[in-house]
Image (spheres, rainbow, N blue to C red):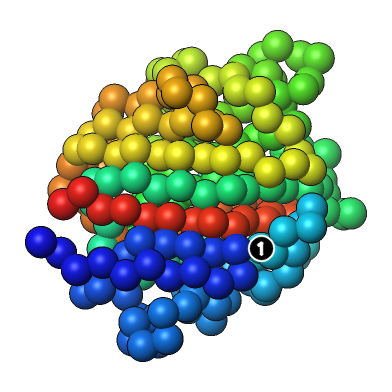
């Protein structure tokens, strides 16, 4: 049986395999911002809606310019170097639009998982502003699955319309509970404690042998908050 450790601090809690976590976490039984690996982002301990949390931001200089490049998913995230393959990931996330957010900003925030040393990962993320848009096509793009770098949203939307995104009742400015259950090439997303999944992916593109870290992701124009991250491995 694998040994486990519960880590909790600043609204953060995780169930982690001892063999995969950093020495500082194992020694101190607490996780702080410095325990996360950062990819193009800044992370600090803060609070949101009266709850202790982590705040995740990216520099405005990194915002994508649609006049010069096609909008696409990138690897802006804070992540823990755990050895995750199958199991359950839970987290409370919230997002706000940054004051200088571009017009295409949607409050992008979500989970990345099975992050390997080559920076490949799977992700399920949210576009909260789409959920309340008057345009039904935008509403249908509230939740998104991608596999970085080969299967980003634009490719998946082009090759398999409506298969890797869906509508969900979410919004910016409030806590959203995400529970992701991963098994082999299947992932199910549960939102806000509902007993049935809001979103199902049956063919995770990186395959059942992919494994690695777990993190929280964002994109252009977003200030993201997260707390109560729990990672439970089933293998």
Q: Residue at x 36, y 88 (%)?
A: 27
Q: Nearer the viewer, residue 145 or 23?
A: 23
Residue in the picture at 68% in, 29% down: 170
Q: Position of residue 200 (x, y in %)?
A: 38, 24
Q: Residue at the far right: name it.
A: 99
At numbered mark 1, what does the secondary structure look like: helix, strand or loop?
strand
Is the N terminus in the top left, top right, bottom left or bottom right quadrant? Answer: bottom left
- Residue 17: image location, x then y, percent: 26, 66
* Rendered location of residue 108, percent (x, y): 65, 43
Name which residue lies at 68% across and 43% down.
175
Q: Is residue 30 above or below residue 71?
A: below
Task: Spot the residue most to the left.
Answer: 1
In the rendered view, tell whether residue 138 sits above or below residue 95.
Answer: above
* Residue pictured at 67% horizontal, 73% vertical: 44
Q: Position of residue 148 (x, y in %)?
A: 40, 48
Q: Which residue is mark 1?
A: 53
Instruction: State the residue in front, 171 or 107.
Output: 171
| Count of numbered tags | 1
Q: Is residue 186 visible?
A: yes
Q: Residue furthest top?
A: 136
Asked where in the image residue 228 lies, by quadrant, the reply is bottom right
Question: Based on the displayed image, in which of its 4 quarters is residue 28 positioned?
Answer: bottom left
Residue 66 in the figure: left or right of residue 180: right
**Residue 205 visible at all:** no
Does residue 225 appear to the left or right of 149 in the view shown? Answer: right
- The answer to whether 37 appears left or right of 102 in the picture is left
The answer to whether 230 appears left or right of 78 in the picture is: left
């Amino acid at each position: 049986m694998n040994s486990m450790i519960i880590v909790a601090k600043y609204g953060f809690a995780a169930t982690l395999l001892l063999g995969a976590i950093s020495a500082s976490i194992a020694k101190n039984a607490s996780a702080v911002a410095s325990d996360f690996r950062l990819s193009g982002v800044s992370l600090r301990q803060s609070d949101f809606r009266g709850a202790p949390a982590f705040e995740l931001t990216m520099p405005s200089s990194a915002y994508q310019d649609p006049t010069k490049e096609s909008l696409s998913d990138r690897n802006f995230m804070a992540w823990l170097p755990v050895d995750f393959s199958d199991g359950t990931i839970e987290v409370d996330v919230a997002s706000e639009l940054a004051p200088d957010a571009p017009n295409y900003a949607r409050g992008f925030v979500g989970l990345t998982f099975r992050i390997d040393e080559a920076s490949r990962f799977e992700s399920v993320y949210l576009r909260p502003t789409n959920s309340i848009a008057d345009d039904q096509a935008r509403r249908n793009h509230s939740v998104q699955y991608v596999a970085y770098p080969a299967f980003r949203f634009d490719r998946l939307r082009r090759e398999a319309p409506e298969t890797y995104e869906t509508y969900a009742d979410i919004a910016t400015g409030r806590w959203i509970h995400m529970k992701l259950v991963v098994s082999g090439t299947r992932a199910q997303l549960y939102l806000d404690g509902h007993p049935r999944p809001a979103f199902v992916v049956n063919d995770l593109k990186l395959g059942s042998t992919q494994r690695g870290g777990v993190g929280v992701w964002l994109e252009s124009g977003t200030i993201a908050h997260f707390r109560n991250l729990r990672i439970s491995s089933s293998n």
